[in-house]
Amino acid sequence: MLEINFNPFPELSTERLTLRQFTNEDVHELFVLRSDKKVMQFIPRPLAKTTDDILQLIQKVNEMISKNEGINWAVTLKNDSKVIGMIGYFRMAKEHYRAEVGYMLHPAYQGKGIMREALNTVIDYGFSVMKLHSMEAIVDPQNLPSAKLLERYGFTKAGFFKEHEFFDGKFFDSFYYTLLTPVK
């Protein structure tokens, strides 16, 4: 079975970004993301209504990290602590060496290659440090930018699930993407 330890927290950096752990000081920037209908349109989760919702989310994320059950990074620009996005692994199946990757980015920063840069680093971390064998991502079929991003990094569409998720009184379809460890 996969042995993972996120202590100390693995801060990652790229040419333009710092991927760091969330703190309670991030509550307002994360609230902006999680309460924005455009950001959340393809994520079947309730919109945040209060900053207390976000404080609970930050606590849940950090508990998951402390238990080595998953990890989420706050996406920030280098030399600026303001959170502009979120990326991480959750729904880990340690017995199968697999985890699901997910991400979101503030609309003002979309289309600038920021999530591409973050995803590249997180994929590398997943295979080289976490020792994952495979990654998966579940995408709303209407979320074409996310599908294109995954495909750019070699994720392949492994399935289509009709009315796969039920949220807010409606059923939603899903594309299921997968990526295997690169052959060396």
Image: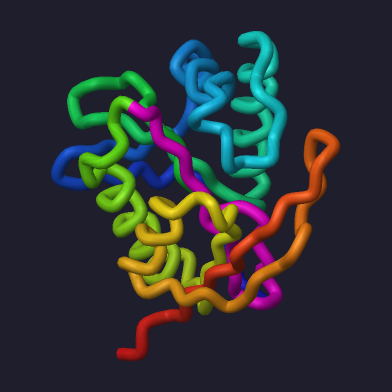
Q: How many marks?
A: 0
Q: Nearer the viewer, residue 93 or 130?
A: 93
Residue at image x 38%, y 68%?
151
Direction from residue 180 to residue 66 in the image, left or right: right
In the displayed structure, 135 sits above or below 144; it is below
Q: Residue at x 49, y 50 (%)?
A: 143
Q: Quadrant of residue 60?
A: top right
Residue 104 shows up from this direction: yes
In-front residue for pair 110/67: 110
Q: What secondary structure prevails in the magenta region?
A: strand
Compared across the picture, whether 146 is left or right of 101 comes to: left
Which quarter of the image is occupied by the C terminus? Answer: bottom left
Q: Is 122 colored magenta in this rendering?
A: no
Closer to the camera, 119 or 113? 113
Can the viewer see residue 5 in this picture? no
The magenta-colored residue range is: 89-107
152 up-or-down from 167: above or below: below
The residue sitting at the bottom extreme is 184
